[in-house]
Amino acid sequence: MSMDVLSIYRRQLSNFSALGTEEEFELARRFRDHNDQEAGYLLVSAHLRLVVKIAMEFQRKWMKNASDLIQEGNVGLIKALNKYDPDKGIKFSYYASFWIRAYIFKFIMDNWRMVKVGTTQAQRKLFYNLGKEKQRLESLGMTADAEAISQNLNVSETDVVEMSQRMDHRDLSLDMPLNDDPNATPINIIPSVDEGVEDRLVLKEASQLLRENIKELSPQLNEKEKDIIELRLLAENPITLREIGEKYGFTRERARQIEAGVLNKVKKYMQNNISDFSRAWLEDS
């Protein structure tokens, strides 16, 4: 999208009026409860400027053509409309921004050639962290060899060697500055993802809120519940309920019951202490 076309598009968006908070809630309820397409249209069109704003943040660091980013962001906006629950009391723009960013991230990753090299969980971990780990080790004066990297990232040396070879033959360096900022490189911008990238990127914000408040909740929990939070909810690679049960000597079903209990405590705590936290984020995780 050239700057002239983008300017025309942005001027056209000025024809759509902003909505008040209560008006947004009412439109969202009409869409959710009665499939009111006009209400959905009004809610989406009022937030098209938000998509452009977010897309331009990515465009400045990633690519010159903003058209695809805006299109993908608009898809994310529509996805947000279909997932949004106005009864949670969260502003639509706040909720939608997660989905808009998620779809733009997904588009960038799908069209970044080297993403295709990661087919297993270990390979994906290496793709997103190999460059950073090498830089970290070298900054400490250590040798960034396969053995050190494999130990620090908890992957095999074979995977490290194979991924290094693949990345050494890339068309474009992941460490190449994207603009005048030396820290704005592809390896620093591409997020670490697994299956269900859109949902996981949305839940990332909720996870951060939980981490920031978990210390205050911790005194109210016993050791088993703390383990559930650390090893099941917050861990990058969560352990299974069976493993939790084996650790404490009870069944998988009992572990599931304890997890359900601690989830309820977490949801109530977050709802009472964070005004814009949605219980649905934890329920979907």
Image (cartoon, rainbow, N blue to C red):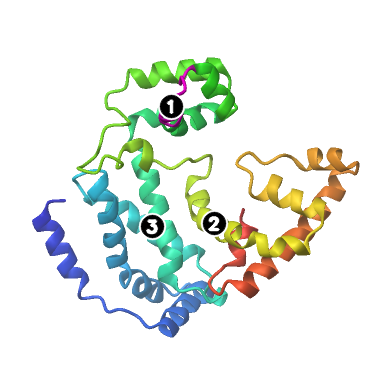
Q: Quadrant of residue 217?
A: bottom right
SS type, badge 3: helix
- Mark found first going from the N terminus, 3 or 2: 3
Q: Secondary structure at mark 1?
A: helix
Q: Residue at x 54, y 56 (%)?
A: 208
Under mark 3, the amino acid is Ile
Front-most of 145 and 138? 138
The residue positioned 25% from the left and 55% from the top of the image is 56
Q: Where residue 93 sits in the image (x, y, percent)?
A: 40, 69
**Residue 23 drawn in magenta:** no
Q: Which residue is mark 3?
A: 100
Is residue 68 depicted above or below 164 in this figure? below
Residue linked to disc 1 = 134
Disc 2 element:
helix
Q: Earlier in the sequence, mark 3 or mark 1?
A: 3
Three-letter amino acid code of the residue under disc 1:
Lys
Q: Nearer the viewer, mark 3 or mark 1?
A: 1
| Residue bearing mark 2 | 208
Frontmost of labels 2 and 1 is 1
Range of the magenta residues?
135-145
Residue type highlighted by circle 2: Gln
The crowding category of the residue bearing disc 2, from other C-alpha atoms within 10 Å (few below 14, some 14 to 19, many at least 20), is few
